[in-house]
Amino acid sequence: MSNPVEVSQIIANAKKSIEEKKAQLGLTKIGDNKKDALIALKARIAASVANVQAKSYLDNTQISMPRTLPEQLMQKQQNMEERDRSLNLIIDSEGRTVDKRTGEVVLMQTPMPTLKANIKTQKRDYRTAMGGDKKDFSSGLASTVSGVSSVLEAKLGDKKSEGEKEMAESFYDNRLKFKTKERGKRKLVFNEKGKYLDIANKLRAKSKLLLLQKEIASISKKTGISNESKLALIQPKRTTKEVIPNIEWWDFAVLNEMNYSCMEALNDQQLREKIRINRLIEHPVQMKPPTHSDRKVAPAVMLTKKERKKLRRQNRAELLKEDQEKIRLGLIPPPEPKVKISNLMRVLGTEAVQDPTKVEEYVRNQMAKRQKLHEEHNASRKLTDAERAAKKKRKLMENTSLIVNVSVYRVRDLSDPAVKFKLEANCNQLHMTGAVLLYKNLNLVVVEGGPKQQRKFKRLMLNRIKWAETNSRIKDDDESTREKNTCSLVWEGTVKTRSFGPMIFKMCPTITFARDFLKKLGIEHYWDKAQSDVIIQQSDF
């Protein structure tokens, strides 16, 4: 509850505002009529009560609005007084709240709950009032919200100076519109007659259609029609219709006419003279195949082990003979005697007897020198790591500029990451290109490379990887029956150019997606061949 002083102050302000309104409207004097006086008194009382209720409601809701410095100090002082007063309150034997010092009964103010929508409305009205809206807020004394706005306008309008008002208006942008999300009104709409009956009929028809489709699928599976229909979906490559010309180009070179009508007008003798048929046989010019190379490759001569040893002895004998000639001419010094522990007495003779320790040290130094020279000679011929890697790559790389070998494999399941890693690692190590298309129980592996690379990769796919022992299994509708994973070679052959880059894995959600992916490269027949093999295999079982 508010203090009596505040209530009297608010009533005085209300009276003052009413007098000012009367002065503006020219109603400075009220007649002596008792009825008019009673009406005016009731209006003043209603205005004062509305202002008091508005202030009490504003304090209960605790709307956070900007205040001036004196108002803030006054509010802090009131809060301190209420806190001191609450410390002196006690409860007597009857359960009433009593002041400990004076013994008076104190009526506690209980906070009244309110909706957040009301608080938002009050804030919006306050913003509108501060934004320069010139509506008269004092005319709505019947509503509590408008009463709050009028009290705030009266209190703030009296205390604010003109400079403060101008400053407040300078920080407000009239272009801004505060729009809140309000729920639109819902109209009462009645359902039309038969609406839910139509929905129920559609659901029944849909369930019947699904049941009929299941029956057709089961019957076609038993009779084998489904496999034939799937096989029919595989479309062959479209061929353009050839236009039959009026005359073939090879006949035009002989007849020099645009059609064959001249042959009907000529007799046999004239036709022979015109065409000049003779007994000579014309052979067309033979063209070289596209993979033909003009460079002549001489086959390497393979020698036996005995022949290789003989050739090595002959080469070493020639080198030794050259060194002997150079020594005889004095071009190079003669080599030191090859002394060993076993032959030092035979080579050195009396020197070994005179100082055996010195001779043994000399012999061992010679042996160490020969060993070091031998190791350095071997190290000079040894390949470095880079040269060894280049040699290994050179052995694996093959010339595919003229022709490329292609192999297509079909795998039932490729969900095991270890198998994927093996395929990608071996393809990169062999410097091959290709792609892997992943789709349910039809996984296509296409690899491109040379003949040697294809042999190694084929051994990996068909022999080295144990497909039946992989962790992944394909489960049918009946979990008791499981099919083992398998891999089969669909096709292998040669093409002119490569179609892929480094090995990639492509997830295919549908069969059409996989076929279109290969169709862009002009090799959709790979997928058609693999799919037809799967359908035929299923129909056999």
Image (cartoon, rainbow, N blue to C red):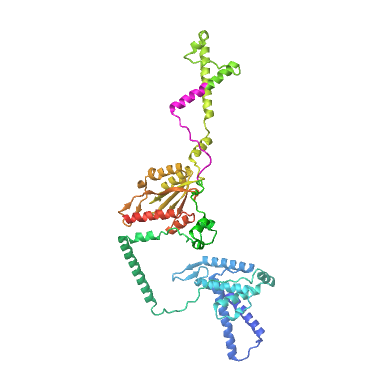
- As drawn, is 488 to the left or to the right of 42? left
Q: Residue furthest right?
A: 163
Q: Is residue 193 visible?
A: yes
Q: Residue furthest bottom?
A: 33
Q: Whole-percent x and y of residue 495?
A: 47, 49
* Chain part drawn in magenta: 291-317
Q: Nearer the viewer, residue 23 or 31?
A: 23
Count numbered badges in the picture.
0
Q: Nearer the viewer, residue 33 or 205?
A: 205
- As drawn, is 205 to the left or to the right of 512? left
Q: Let me know if residue 300 is in the magenta part.
A: yes
**Does 99 appear above or below 266?**
below
Q: Whole-percent x and y of residue 359?
A: 52, 12
Q: Let me know if residue 324 is in the magenta part.
A: no
**Does 528 appear above or below 452?**
below
**Does 273 appear above or below 340?**
below
Q: Nearer the viewer, residue 536 or 197?
A: 536
